Amino acid sequence: MNLIADSGSTKTYWAPVENGKTGKVILTQGLNPYFTSPEMMHEILLNELVPDIDCKTVNHIWFYGAGCSTVRNQEQIRGQLLSLFRRAQIEVYHDILGAARALFGKEQGIACILGTGCNSCFYDGDRAISNIPSLGYLFGDEGAGSYLGKRFLEKYLKNKLPDPIRIAFEQRYQFSLEDILNSLYNKPFPNRFLASFSLFLKEHTNNSFIHDLIYFSFIEFFEAHVTRYNNYYSYPTGFIGSIAYHYEDILREAAAAETISVSKILETPVSGLVEYHGRW
């Protein structure tokens, strides 16, 4: 059996594949090395993955993960997997390469991720040969869930929300200023905390204020990332991720305003990666 993993900052999808057939996808917490310690990674794998997998039967693991852009982080993930799947050949790649392979296979295109965080690359049909750095939720992640949450909370805390939205938000969450600041500065995974508000935003996209907040966040993503690639208008642009998937209409609206041709929009790259690695 082989495993294909797509890991973001919030969750990881594990697809077991045997004899060309995909088994039930297993969901665990995300394993981004920038937010998850080696000890926490081991605990997540041991408690959330291993109970559903016979480690001794796994021959090959392809792991595509957020935060796996450096050799050090790749080796950290590989080491944790190898400690449990000792017979497996393990390959660890950045999640943007997984997105590109899932979206375009062997064709060229601009691959984008819009989930908790964001990323993008120009893909030549084999490799991600150009990448505009995301810079994470503090300095970047335009258009991603953490960015939408950050912009929304800023409007809320500075009393810039329309009254109906403010009232609905306070009825739903009942957060004090101290609660919000504590979640951002003292608790783990502040990016996940910020991105969690995208669920609330999704429920209120018919409100013009919320629609525009999302729309212009996507415009910022296109201008900070996609338009930076040479001749970007000559290539298809594809998206992976929950934000791209659930806000598809607004995303395509923003893309049209930037004269960007959007091809596929997928919630996860798993099915595309199973097809890509279907040579087994």
Image (cartoon, helix red, strand yellow):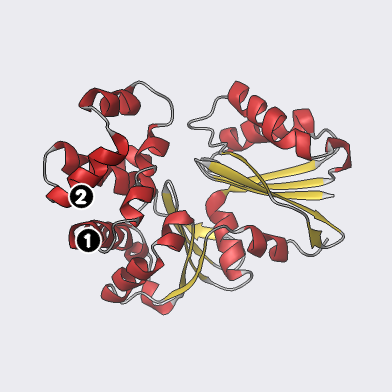
Q: Mark 1 vs mark 2: which is more N-terminal? A: 2
Could you tell me residue 39's position as x and y percent? 61, 21
Position of the C terminus by quadrant: bottom right
Element class at badge 1: loop
Which amino acid, by three-letter code, is at mark 2?
A: Ile
Q: How far apart are marks 1 and 2 (CA)?
A: 8 Å
Whether label 1 touches label 2, CB < 8 Å: yes
Residue visible at 76% across and 32% down?
Answer: 82
Q: Please state which amino acid type lies under the numbered disc 1.
A: Asn
Residue 231 in view here: no
Q: Looking at this view, is 57 or 86 the one in front? A: 57
Q: Position of residue 270 (x, y in %)?
A: 64, 57
| Quarter of image, res 160 | top left
Q: Name the residue under label 2.
A: 165
Q: In this view, does 56 lie to the left or right of 169?
A: right
- Identified at 63% across, 69% down, the residue is 105
Nearest to the observer: residue 255 or residue 43: 43
* Label 2: how many Cα within 10 Å (few below 14, some 14–19, many 20+): some
Element on which disc 2 rests: helix
